[in-house]
Image (spheres, rainbow, N blue to C red):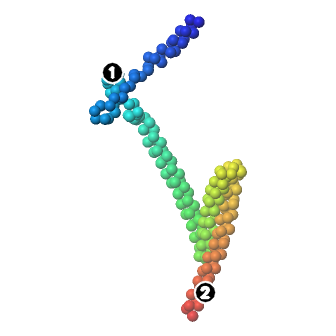
Amino acid sequence: MKSYILIFLLSVIPLFSYAQEDLIITTPADTTLSATSNSGANFHDPDEDSYSPLLFFIFIATIVFIIVGVLTIVFIGLLILGLLAAGILSVSILVGYHQRSIEKGFKVFLISTTSAMGLIFGISLIWIFNKVVHWWTLQTALLIGSVSGLLGGVFIGFINSFIIGKLILFIKNRNNKKST
C-alpha cells in the first residue's frame, strides 16, 4: 500500500510544480486590456512570436521542390512533344519528296499528328475515367486508352484528309469557274 501512495505522489507532484501562475486582467484608465500576473509583471503570450526558422525553411524548401518538379515535368513533356513533332514533320517531308506529291506528304502529316494527339488524349481520358469508376487495373486502362486513342486518331486523320481534299477540290473548281 505504501508503494501505491508513493507512486501516486511521485506522479502528481510534477503536475503542481509546473502549473502556470494565475492571471489577472486589469483595465487601466485608458480602457485597454492588459494581462498581468500576481507579481505585477506583464504577461507574455507565447503564440504571438511562434516563428520557427526550421518550419519556415521546410516550407520554402517544399515550395521550391514543388516548383522545380512541375517545371521538370513540363520541360520533359515539351521535349517529348518537340521530338515527336520533329519526327512527324521530317517523315511527312520525306514521304512528300519520295512520292513527289505535296498532297501525300500533307496527308501523312495530318494522319500522324491526329494519331499522336489521339494517343495522348485517349490515354488521358481513359485514365481519368478509370480513376472515377475503377473498372480496370491501371495497365488495362492505359492499354485500352492507347489503342482506342490511336485508332480514333487515325480515323479522324483519314476523315480530315478526305474533307480537306474535297474542300481543296471545291475551291479549285470555284476559282476555275471565276476565271472563265
Q: Residue furthest left?
A: 29
Describe residue 59's horizontal placement relative to residue 132 as left or right: left
Task: Give the residue at x 53% y 9%.
Answer: 6
Q: Nearer the viewer, residue 99 or 134?
A: 134
Residue at horizontal 32%, vertical 31%? 27
Q: Residue at x 65, y 68 (%)?
A: 156
* Residue at the spot of label 2: 173
Quarter where residue 149 is shown:
bottom right
Residue 157 higher or lower than 173, as above or below: above
Q: Residues within 10 Å of mark 2 (few under 14, many from 20)?
A: few
- Identify the amino acid type marked 1: Ser
In the image, residue 81 above or below residue 40: below
Specify the amino acid type for callout 2: Asn
User: Residue 2: which numbered mark, if any?
Assistant: none
Q: CA distance from mark 1 to mark 2?
A: 102 Å
- Identity of the residue drawn at 69% across and 63% down: 151
**Do the residues bearing badges 1 and 2 touch, measured as CB atoms within 8 Å?**
no
Q: Which residue is mark 1?
A: 39
Q: Which of pointers 1 and 2 indicates the residue nearer the eye?
A: 1
> For residue 172, which quarter of the picture?
bottom right
